[in-house]
Amino acid sequence: MIDTVQAEKCIALQQEEQEVMQSIDADSVTFSASDLTGTQVHLRVSVDFEEPRQALVTTVDGVLATSDPSYHPSCEDNISCGTSFAAEVTLSHLPPIDLTLLLPPGYPLYEPATIMSLDAMYSWITATDIEKLWAFISDITQEGVENGGEGILWRIYELLRDGHVLSILELCDGPHLHIPHPTPEFLVPLLLSHSISAASEKFEKQSYPCPICLITVPGSKCMRIDKCGHVCCKSCLSDFWMLSIEQGEVEKVGCVDESCVKISAKNANDPQWTPVGEDQVRQIVGEALLQRWIDLQEKRMVEREPTMVRCPNRICQALVPKPPLARDPGDEEYTNWDNLRSCQSCDLSFCLACRKTWYVRIPILSVRPKFVSNVPRHGPIATCGSINNDLIQSYLSATPKSKERLRIERQYGKKLIGRLATGWKHNKEEKKSKEWVEANTMSCPGCIIKVEKSSGCNHVRYLFALLSKSILSSPNQRTNVLMAFHTDEMCEVCRTLLLSVWPEAPHRESLHPFFNEGDAMLWESLLMTVEFGVIFGRHTTEAVS
C-alpha cells in the first residue's frame, strides 16, 4: 500500500504522461476510468513505414507456393489449392495493434502497468506471436518501476509505431517482411486495403506547397501524382488540366513539377507514355472531359504508332499495341508470327493483317501428295484472307518505293508480300501452261503422262500400245483401232504393226466376234460413212467412242 503523498505524486506523473500522449497522437491513445482501481489506457497504433516495404504473406508453416511469388487480389493464380500459399505485396502501413493497459494508483513509481488485452486487427499477428509480444511488453512495464518510475506509454507507443515490434517477432529480414497467417489468401486484400486508406489519411492530415500557386495547402485539398509522388493543389490542377484537354494538348495533362515536365518532353514521341493515370484525371476533371482525354490519347497513340490497332472485337474496340519482341513491318526478317496481337482488355488473339482470330495452319499429311512437302511454306499461319489476287496485282503494278507499295509492305510485311507476289506470278504462268497442255496434248494410255503430237498419227496411242498389245484388251479399244485403221488417223507404220498383231483387222467380219449382229451393222454403217469422207480422222474416233 502507498500513502496519500505517494498516491498524489503518482497521479501527477500519470496526468503529465497523459497530456504528453494526447499531444502526440490523441486519436491513437485514449484514457478512461476503470471499474477496477486505476486508469484504463487504450492504444490503437498502426505500424507505419517511412518507405513502402515488400511483404511476403504465406501460410503459417511458411511454405512458398512459387519460387518467384507475385500477387494481385483479383488474380486467382496466386492462390495455391493445397496447404501452401505465397503472395508478395507492397505495403506502407500495417493494420493497427490494439493494447489495453491498466494503470494502478501506484503507477509509475511503485506499481507496474498491467496488460488487460492485446490483439491485432485482421489477426495479422498469429496467436503464438501475440504471446511473445505480451511477454515483451510485460517486461517493459516492470522495467519502468525498476528504473525509478519511468513512464512506459511512450516507449510502448514507439515500439508499435515504428515497426520495431516486427524485429522482436522475427517477422522482418532487412527491408523485407514475412507475415505468416492461417488464411493468407483472405488476409492479403485486407492488408492492401488498409495500407491504401491509411496512406490517404496520413496525406490529408499534412500540408504541402503547391508548385503553381506557391501556397501551402492542406493535403485534403491536394493530389499526389502516383507516378512521381509530386503534390499539387486540386484547384490549380483542375484549371490547368481542363484547359489543356479543351485545347487538345493532352501531353500537358500530368505533373506540373519542373523535372516531370522535362521527362514528359523527352517522351513526347512515345505513343504509350502517359504521365498520369485515368483515375486521377477523373477525380480532377470529371467524367465528361475524361472521355475527351481518353479519345485524344488514343488518337495520339494511333498517329504516332502505325502498328497500334483497335481490337476487332465489336464489344471491346480497345487499342492493342505492338508486342515488344515483334519486328516492324518491312523488316527483312518479318514473319507471320509478327502479325500476332493480343488484346489486354478482352484477351482476344488476332492477326494484324486481316483482323481475324489467330489461326494456326495444321496440314493433313495423310492426304497431301509427297511432292507437296517440298513446297515452301508461308510462315507458321495460313495466308490471310485479306491478301487476295487484287492486292497482289496492286502491289506488282505499283512502282518500287511508291507510297502504295510501302503501305502494303508496312501492313503485311515486305518479306511476306514479296514471297506471295513471286508465288502468284509463278502460279499465273503455271496456270497458262496447264491450259496449253490441256488444249495441245493428250495422256499416254499407259502412264497418263501428257504427250504433244508433233506430226503424223498418234504413235503414243497406237505404236507403243500395240507393242505391248494392251490396246487390244477390250472391245471398245479394238473398235477404236479398227476405226483408225480404216481412216487416215493411223499411219503405215502402225498399220503394218497392227496387221502383224491382228491379221483380221482389215476385214469387217472382225467386228462380229466382239459384237452382236445389230451392233456390227451399226459399225459397218459408220465405216461406210467414213469411207465417203463425211467424218475425218480423230473426230470420227471421238464420235464413235
Image (cartoon, helix red, strand yellow):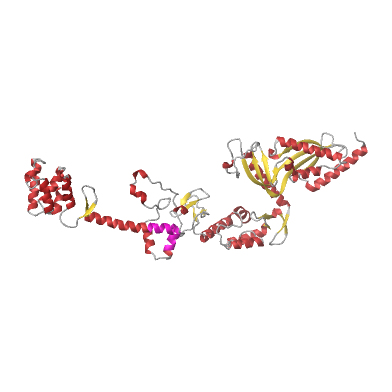
Q: Is residue 311 magenta?
A: no
Main SS, magenta residues: helix
Q: Position of residue 402 (x, y in %)?
A: 42, 66
| Residue 326 left/right relative to 373 | right
Task: From the viewer's side, name the closer residue of 366 and 257.
Answer: 366
Residue 39 in view, yes or no: no
As drawn, 141 above or below 347: above
Q: Is residue 473 left or right of residue 150?
A: left
Q: Quadrant of the N terminus?
A: top right
Depth check: give the residue in front, 166 or 264.
Answer: 166
Would residue 60 be found to the left or right of residue 402 on screen? right
Give the quadrant of residue 3: top right
In the image, is residue 420 part of the stretch drawn in magenta?
yes
Using the image as rendered, state which of residue 430 and residue 165 is in the foreground: 430
Residue 272 x, y percent position in the rendering: 56, 57
Q: Is residue 88 above or below residue 208?
A: above
List x then y, in percent, for residue 455: 17, 57
**Residue 456 screen position, x and y as percent:** 15, 56
Magenta span of residues = 405-421
168 left or right of 432 in image: right
- Image quadrant assignment for residue 265: bottom right
Residue 129 can be seen in this image: yes
Residue 416: name its quadrant.
bottom left
